[in-house]
Structure formats: C-alpha cells, structure tokens
Image (cartoon, coloured by chain):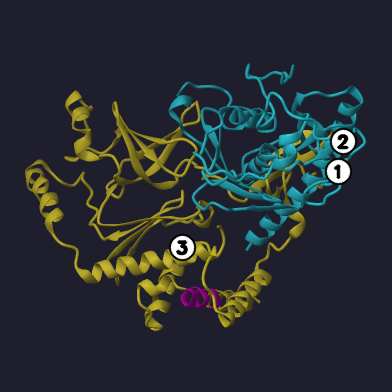
C-alpha cells in the first residue's frame, strides 16, 4: 500500500509494527494526550549548533526534545568511486545509530534505507555541478533516538553542509506528522510513532517553497493528507527561520 | 567543538574578551550587513550592470547566495566569499603536501584541496641534477625520492582540464622536507606575500608557509643549486645525505622547533593571520615571559598573545594617523 514516490523498492512499515494490535481508543471520541504535554500542532523547541566536530569540513549538532543527532560533512574530496570523470559531484550519505541510542541497548545499526532517504532529501538542494569529480560525504549519527529521527537528521545535515561551505540552493527543513486515529500530531515522539496509523514526512526548501522529498506510510484519508501537508509546510518554514538564526550566530561569532 | 576551547579563569576570560573586542573595533571590515546565509537575497542595485560571481545564483530575478559567507564587491563583480571553504589554489602558489600514493610516473599529494595534487616525475629535479629524459629505471626508483607519507614542498604549476592540480618542484628549495614538524591551520590564515620561505637565523630554523594552510617548521637545510655541481662531486654528495640522516638533531634545536610550532598553533587558535614577523614576535614574547614550551598552549599565554596583538594593532592604527 505505501509506496514512496521515486525510491528504491523497499517496503516501509511503521516502527515496531505488530500484525494484530488492540485499538488504543475504545471509543472513537477519545483524544490522544501527548506525553510531553504539547499541543497537537506544536513542534518541540529546536536547538542547533554548528562546528561540533573539529576534524570535519562542516558539522552540526541538533537537539529536539530527546532526539539528539550529530552530522559531519567531509569534502569535497577525492574518492575511489569518483575516479571516473563526471560533470557533477557525488553525494554519499551514511546514517547510523549509536549503541546507546534506543531505549533497549543494542548493536549500533547502519540503516541503509534511512541513508538513501537522506540522500534523496539532500541531493535536490545541493549544486552538484560545483564540485565535479569529487565526493561530499555526509555522516549522520543518532546519539539518542526520541522520535522523528530522520527529519531531525535531514535538517541537521543541511546545516552541516552550509557550515562546510558547499553550495546549495537553499537550506532543507524536514518535519513529520503522525496520524493517530482521527488526530494529526506533528513531530511525534517515539511512543506516538509506535501507535501511529500513518506517517508523513515532508522535506522542503523554505525560501524557495519547493519540496525535495515526500514520504507517506500507512492509512490516510484525503482531507487528512491535505491538512497534514499544510501543517508540515508551515512548520518547515518556521524551522527554516530557526536554522538561519543558528547559522547567522555562528557566522558572527567566527568573524574576527 | 570549534572556537576557543580553553579553561579560562574569570579574570582571563574578561581580559581575553576585552582584547578581542578591541581587535574587532579596530578591524576596518566591521560590516555586519555583508554576511549572508544560504538563500539570503543579496542587496544589489539592479539598475547597475553587475556580474554574478561565485556563491550567487538567480532566483526569480533576485540575486541569492548559495553559501554562507560575506558579500564582496569588486567593481562590478558581486560574489560571496565562504567563511570556511577548502583551499583555492592559484598558479604559482607554494604549497606543502603529504605524499599519498606513488603511481606511474607521478606522485599524488594531499594538499588541503578537494582533489589530490599530482607531482609528475618529469617536474622533479633528478638527484644528480642532470636534465635528461626520465627512463624506466627512474620510474622504478621513484620510491627512493619520495615515499608515502613524506612531506614535500612544491609549487602549483597549472590546472588540468578536468580541474585537478599539477605541481612542480624544479628548484632546490622545493622537495622533501625532513627533520621538522608539519602544522595544519586554516588556509585563509596564510595570506599571500612575497616570501614564503623564511630562514630564521637566530634559531637556525626553516619556516615554510604553504598557501594551503600546511606550515612546515624544521631544521635549516642548505639549499644548493644542483646546476653548479659537476660530475666529480656527485658521488661525494650521494654519501653526504646518508651521513646527515645519522646526525642527531641537538636538543636545543628541537626545543626551538617546538617553540615556534606552538606559537603557530596559538596564533591559529586565536584566528590571527600567520606571517613570519608575527610568529617571531610571539616566540619572543614567550621567551621574555619565560613560559615553558608546553605551557604555551595554555590559557594564560593565549590571553597574553591576544592582548599583545590588540596593542600592536592599535599602535599601528595610531601611527597611520
């Protein structure tokens, strides 16, 4: 049922998907109460800081509630795979979890599907023709997973790319919305993601008003889709402003 | 984390802040309007004809920035200079690099650029100094000249059509660098100047400021012009390098090298542009204050250097008026 537009043929299922699940709402009138007391259409306060990793060309740290990620960007640099001459550069994304990121300590896994989603979200915004024959490597590390990891990583990655001085059309802001029964909650936490009926992740370039990636999973009704997309676009433009102030602060601090 | 990461006491913090504020007020380019982030519109008078330079693009008739940086205007050219970008090489720059790979008839050097630089075997002077065609034997003996992880000083010769860089090391002052330290600083801190090879006589130390941000501090090596040498002396010379390898660098020389290297590190942490005079002044400051070499990287010395630099620049400003 859920097919991501223009992506690798991997079926995407909600996290911790169980085949049979008792309905959480016995009556359809009950509303979901958010664990951290936010409103349904309220995002978590975002904290961004660039320059987290000294040895990388560019890096950024993002913290939204309990989701903490760090992204480092290396490049443009040479790589064995980019030896063939090409007019455009290559973007190489890697998304991984630390062993202590999830509530249950497990092996740090390297999620290939998240890596390719990160790649698709970013490649629309980067001007690849400005660094031919070289590669830009983006390494994303989730230090603590507190829900909506991928959108936070995408926003953090675009800040890291801006920090590295790589030419982009615009910053990329990403937000996800979960559908819980008849409620739409924005920026879900881990618990909400486990109960969701469907999710939507939208990454857009706020100043250009262009969407780079759109991902729907689960069951959605058409009016819900419209409402959710509108919510996402509003939230992305606000997130874009927060990201800009972070970059401006970093720039003014480094000017001597 | 980037930025000054020093354990500063309260008084040190105040002193450092005061010195940095003084420096900022003295700098002539204190124009905060000029800094832009990605997709910010650049204020331009659209009636004038202007050229769109690096870091800008056209969006619905507006000029927007594609990198985070400072807007520079030179005559009609409007471009955005990125704050933290890779080194941008130009022909004739002196660079210091590290050998990454020995391939067919060339060496690959890592300089702080997006691609590795290439040093062709034919762009190197032969050890015996004779100008001749490089034979297959020369190719097999490439490893005797430079191996992997050797530090080499060279000059940018030209750009290939696909964007990669070619270097040359045609005179005696270029070549393998031994007996010293390689320091890596940000490329924008090394400004273009007439002299990049500095011989500090009072220490007997060579200082090479590579444009790419690689700085070499090492024991002084006599640069002999190989053209003058004739065949009779060539066998004698081939023995001399071996003997040199066995000579021990005296302790005082090593201490001097470390002192100068630490001075460079302090200057780069504080973000001051690096040139030979400033390095010498910092070293003198460290010896007058009688600070230990390893204490030079501590917070007190950083604060002293910042204060000294603020004083120096304010004096220069007063002298100009």
Residue B50, relative to residue A64: is it above or below? above
Element under label 3?
Answer: loop
Q: In this view, does B27 lie to the left or right of A216?
A: left
Query: Residue A206 vs residue B294: left or right?
Result: right
Residue carrying label 2: A183
Q: Is mark 1 on a helix, strand or loop?
A: loop
Q: Find residue A215 and report its image quarter.
A: top right
Which residue carries the number 3 mark?
A: B275
Q: Which residue is drawn at 19% across and 40% down?
A: B127
Q: In which quarter of the image is the N terminus of chain A?
A: top right
Q: Nearer the viewer, residue A25 or A134?
A: A25
Instruction: Please give the name of the residue rendered at 35% of the width and 73% of the height, measured from the top-left corner.
Output: B293
Chain B colour in the picture: yellow
- Look at the picture and state if B171 lies above or below B192: above
The numbered mark, 1 or 2, whose residue comes first in the sequence reads 1
Q: Tell me the chief SS of the magenta region.
A: helix
Residue that carries the numbered disc 1 in the rendered image: A40
Q: The cyan chain is which one?
A: A
At horizontal 72% and vertical 18% (from top left) the residue drawn is: A3
Residue A114 percent coordinates (x, y):
61, 31
Q: Is residue A122 left or right of residue B131?
A: right
Marks 2 and 3, how far apart at CA? 63 Å
Mark 2: give few (<14), some (14-19) or many (20+) Cα within 10 Å.
some
Q: Residues within 10 Å of mark 1 (few under 14, many from 20)?
A: some
- Residue B114 screen position, x and y as percent: 50, 38
Chain assignment, label 1: A
* Quadrant holding the C terminus of chain A: bottom right
Asked whether the beta carbons under mark 2 and mark 3 sit within 8 Å of each other, the answer is no
Question: Can the viewer see residue A127 in this picture?
Answer: no
């Amino acid at each position: 049922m859920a097919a991501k537009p223009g992506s690798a043929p991997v079926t995407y299922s909600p996290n911790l998907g169980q085949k049979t699940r008792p309905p959480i709402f016995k009556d359809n009138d009950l509303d979901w109460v958010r664990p951290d007391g936010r409103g349904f259409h309220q995002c978590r306060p975002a904290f961004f800081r660039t320059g987290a990793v000294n040895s990388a060309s560019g890096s950024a740290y993002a913290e939204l509630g309990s989701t903490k990620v760090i992204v480092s960007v290396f490049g443009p640099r040479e790589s064995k795979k980019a030896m063939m001459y090409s007019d455009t550069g290559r973007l190489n994304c890697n998304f991984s979890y630390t062993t202590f990121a999830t509530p249950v300590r497990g092996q740090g896994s390297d999620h290939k599907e998240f890596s390719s989603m990160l790649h698709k979200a970013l490649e629309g915004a980067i001007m690849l023709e400005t660094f031919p024959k070289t590669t830009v490597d983006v390494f994303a590390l989730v230090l603590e997973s507190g829900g909506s990891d991928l959108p936070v990583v995408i926003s953090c990655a675009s800040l890291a790319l801006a920090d590295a001085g790589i030419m982009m059309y615009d910053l990329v802001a990403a937000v996800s919305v979960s559908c819980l029964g008849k409620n739409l909650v924005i920026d879900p936490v881990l618990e909400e993601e486990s109960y969701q009926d469907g999710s939507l992740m939208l990454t857009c370039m706020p100043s250009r008003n262009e969407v780079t990636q759109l991902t729907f999973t689960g069951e959605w009704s058409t009016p819900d889709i419209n409402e959710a997309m509108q919510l996402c676009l509003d939230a992305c433009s606000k997130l874009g402003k927060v990201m800009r102030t972070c970059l401006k602060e970093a720039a003014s601090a480094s000017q001597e | 984390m980037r930025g000054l990461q020093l354990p500063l006491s309260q008084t040190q913090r105040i002193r450092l802040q005061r010195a940095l504020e003084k420096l900022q007020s003295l700098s002539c380019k204190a124009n905060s309007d000029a800094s832009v982030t990605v997709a910010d519109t650049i204020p331009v008078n659209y009636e004038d004809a202007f050229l769109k330079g690096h870091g800008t693009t056209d969006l619905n008739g507006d000029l927007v920035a594609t990198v985070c940086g400072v807007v520079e205007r030179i005559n009609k050219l409007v471009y955005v200079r990125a704050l933290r970008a890779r080194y941008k090489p130009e022909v004739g720059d002196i660079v210091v690099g590290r050998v990454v790979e020995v391939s067919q008839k060339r060496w690959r050097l890592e300089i702080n650029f997006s691609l590795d630089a290439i040093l062709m075997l034919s762009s190197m002077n032969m050890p015996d100094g004779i100008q001749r065609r490089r034979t297959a034997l020369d190719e097999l003996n490439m490893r005797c000249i430079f191996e992997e992880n050797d530090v080499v000083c060279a000059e940018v010769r030209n750009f290939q059509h696909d964007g990669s860089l070619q270097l040359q090391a045609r005179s005696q002052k270029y070549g393998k660098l031994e007996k010293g330290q390689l320091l890596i600083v940000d490329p924008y801190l090394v400004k273009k100047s007439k002299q990049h090879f500095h011989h500090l006589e009072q220490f007997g130390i060579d200082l090479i400021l590579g444009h790419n941000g690689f700085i070499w501090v090492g024991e002084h090596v006599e640069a002999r012009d190989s053209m003058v040498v004739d065949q009779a002396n060539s066998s004698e010379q081939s023995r001399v390098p071996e003997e040199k390898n066995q000579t021990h660098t005296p302790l005082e020389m090593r201490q001097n090298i470390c002192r100068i290297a630490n001075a460079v590190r302090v200057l780069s942490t504080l973000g001051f542009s690096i040139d030979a005079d400033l390095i010498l002044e910092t070293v003198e400051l460290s010896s007058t204050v009688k600070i230990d070499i390893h204490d030079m990287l501590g917070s007190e010395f950083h604060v002293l250097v910042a204060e000294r630099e603020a004083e120096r620049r304010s004096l220069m400003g007063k002298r100009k008026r």
